[in-house]
Every structure is written in structure tokens, then in C-alpha cells.
Image (tube, helix red, strand yellow):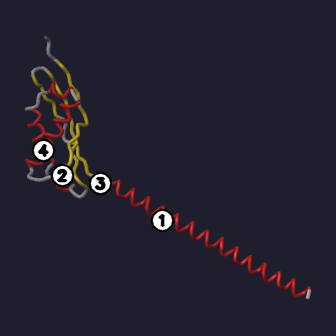
Amino acid sequence: MIVKKSETSSKSSKKSESQDKFTVYAAVLVLLLFAALAFFIYRTRIGADVGVAATYIELKQTIVNDSGVVARLSVTVQVADGDEAWLKENQSLLNSHFRKELSTTEAASLRSMEGKLELQNELKRKFNLLLKTDKVQAVMVTELLLQDQRTD
């Protein structure tokens, strides 16, 4: 009978060992599934925040003299990714229209942030209107140098 008890206890210990291993394996599997789910959620949120890629081109620097206030200005035009060819094709037209638009701009208005923002929005609107499109997403002032040469 003693032998049978040891056999019974060894069988039960083997059974509990296999149940313990199963529990460990199940826990590891559940943790891996949660990690994969968390990674998937993270990647989809990051992907949603990235948005549409953009393409930029800088127009030629232009100098304007407005009644003794000299402004040297460069702007960059932003379009959606995929419109690079369109942007390159229309670059010379954008450059000439940029120079034309600056000739009518009062240079002193560029001293304030509101004046710069107004110029950027106006250039975007006029570029899209001129080219009969909505591909120009933004126009950004990348360089601005103002010099007052008046001797009042």
C-alpha cells in the first residue's frame, strides 16, 4: 500500500506540474496577444496622425522697394504628395506671379505677424485662383528682411 501511495502522489505531482506549465504557457500567450493588440493600436494611431505627406518648393527670392522700405522675401509653396510634377511644371508661373503680387504689397505691413499671415493667405488664394486649382495647400514665408532707407 505504501508503494501505491507514492505512485499516486507522483501521478498527482506530475498532473499538477503539467497544469502549472499549462498556466504559464496560457499566461505567456495572453500577454503576447495583449502586446500585439497594443502595438496594432499604437501603429494605427500614429498612422492616423501623420496625415498626408507634402511636397515643398521655394520660389525665387524677390526684393521690393516700397517708398524707401526695402523688403527681401522668400516663400515656400506646399502641395500634397503626388503633385510634385504639377508644382515643377508651374514653378515659373508661380515665381512671376509672386513678384507681381509683391509689387502691390505694402512692405511696412510685413513688420507684423498679422501682415505676414495675410500675405501668406493671399498668395495661397491667388495662386490657386490663377492656376484654377486647389493644389496649393500653403504658402510660407521662409525669409524676410526689411530695411528702412527713409531719412525722415
Between discs 2 and 1, the one toward the N terminus:
1
Q: Label 2, on which residue?
A: 87
Q: Position of residue 52 (x, y in %)?
A: 28, 55
Between discs 4 and 2, the one toward the N terminus:
2
Rendered residue at 14%/12% (across/down) = 151
Which residue type carries mark 2?
Leu
Please tell me in which quadrant of the rendered image residue 72 appears. top left
Between discs 3 and 4, the one toward the N terminus:
3
Q: Residues within 10 Å of mark 3 (few under 14, many from 20)?
A: few
Rendered residue at 9%/21% (across/down) = 67
Which of labels 2 and 1 is toward the front? 1
Which residue type carries mark 4?
Arg
Query: In the rendered structure, are the residues bearing label 3 and label 4 in contact, judged by CB atoms less than 8 Å apart?
Result: no
Q: SS for tag 3?
A: loop
Real-space CA distance between mark 3 and mark 4, rounded to the nearest whole angstrom? 21 Å
Rendered residue at 70%/73% (across/down) = 20
Q: Nearer the viewer, residue 63 or 114?
A: 114
Real-space CA distance between mark 3 and mark 1, rounded to the nearest whole angstrom? 27 Å
Which residue type carries mark 1?
Leu
Q: SS for tag 1?
A: helix
Q: Label 1, on which residue?
A: 37
Q: Position of residue 16 (x, y in %)?
A: 74, 77
Q: Nearer the viewer, residue 50 or 142?
A: 50
Q: Label 3, on which residue?
A: 53
Rendered residue at 12%/20% (across/down) = 68
Real-space CA distance between mark 2 and mark 1, rounded to the nearest whole angstrom? 41 Å
What label sits on residue 138 in the rendered view?
none
Q: SS for tag 4?
A: helix
Please tell me in which quadrant of the rendered image residue 115 appears. top left
What label sits on residue 125 in the rendered view?
4
